[in-house]
Amino acid sequence: MSNASRTPGCAGGARSWRLAAALLATLGAPSASAVDERPIAEPRLPKLTCHQGYLKREAPYGLEGVRAAIQQALAGGDLAAQRFLEERLAEVIGGDARAALQVLEWAEAAREPELSLYLRAVRETEAVRAPEVVERLARMAETHPDPDHQASALMALETQHRFEPALLERLTTLARRDTLARGVVMNTVRTIGRVMDNDFRRTGELEPYMGGLLEVALDSTDSDVRSLALEMGTYPNARIEGKSLQQLARFLTEDPAPGVREMAALVMSSGRDTQAVLGAFREAFPREKNECVRWALVRFAMRAGGAKALPLLKDFARQDARFQRDYADFKGLYDAGQVDFDRVFPLKAIRHRCEG
């Protein structure tokens, strides 16, 4: 029985192995009897490397061999082989910045789906954090004439541990460019937000990323871009404070899109200064005419302040009778001893036809 047949849970492995073996045979691979078939110590791809001899068969052909196999898999429409070879390409690149740059050179001239496969592979390598690789990806995002290349380059940057201030400034400027395709703007915002999350998890730092995202939001005429830029502030589970909290309050009262105002209320509910958050909600409520945004102010006031926000909620219910039952619901739950909003809210009856 072959190694492949003995390996459980190996989705698409046999097809991937047959494709790779056929390719390597045409390249003059050594015969099976000449290959060391012993298991490789600590394989990096235990789920996909189903034939233990594959890596040793492929070794003499390196990066070019994987590229040839990828092109054959793409031509044949073999999705299982493509998934396997994408991970194999990342493994071959490893921490080698020169190999990553070579793959980026191929990607520059490639079309979809080959383009995305190359850049997804680079994204998962150690080499993606080498300064020269980061610079090449940034330049592709800034200067390539094809939006698909720009978007894929930005996604390849998402696994950075942090952005240096100069690079963050470049990406913020890119997101504010009037001529940039909408999808590329969205990917730029998402990339800044995800690296912000990575950096926050490692260092606890939220700035200057949040400031950059708010710059983009304040400058954008696209409500979806503004909403996404604010939403990224929820990913690190951080306490918003200072200038960022003040800027969010502007969106709460000035943004023309109800969805953006709702998102601002959500992000503000994580504010470190609870009294400042509740004060901004108190100011916004009488000026707000949209029921769903008012509902967002109600529930996110409770998220921010818990039982201490009940007097504010009582005032909201006085101003708008549609929220009297909400006040009664929340008061009953907190009076019963609940203290955690994440446990309170699932017990709360939903009385408004709103998406959030």
Image (cartoon, grey):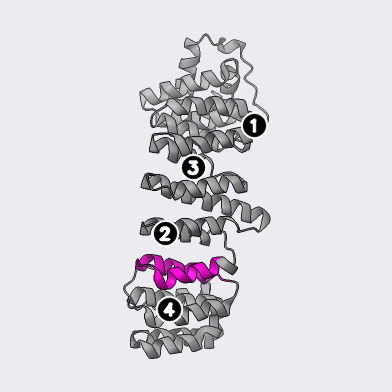
Magenta residues, start to end:
244-271
Mark 4 or 3 closer to N-term? Answer: 3
Residue 57 appears in which quarter of the rendering? top right
| Foreground tag (1 vs 4) | 4
Spot occupied by residue 224 in the image (x, y as percentages of width and height): 37, 57
For label 2, the residue is: 226
For label 1, the residue is: 95
Q: Residues within 10 Å of mark 4 (few under 14, many from 20)?
A: many
Q: Is residue 319 rendered to the left or right of residue 190?
A: left
Asked if 53 appears above or below 29 in the picture, the reply is below
Find the distance from the CA under tag 4 to the CA under tag 2.
19 Å
For label 4, the residue is: 284
Which of the image's four quarters has the N terminus?
top right
Asked if 18 appears above or below 32 in the picture, the reply is below
Find the distance from the CA under tag 4 to the CA under tag 3.
36 Å
Mark 1 or 4 closer to N-term? Answer: 1
Element type at mark 3: helix
Three-letter residue code for mark 3: Met
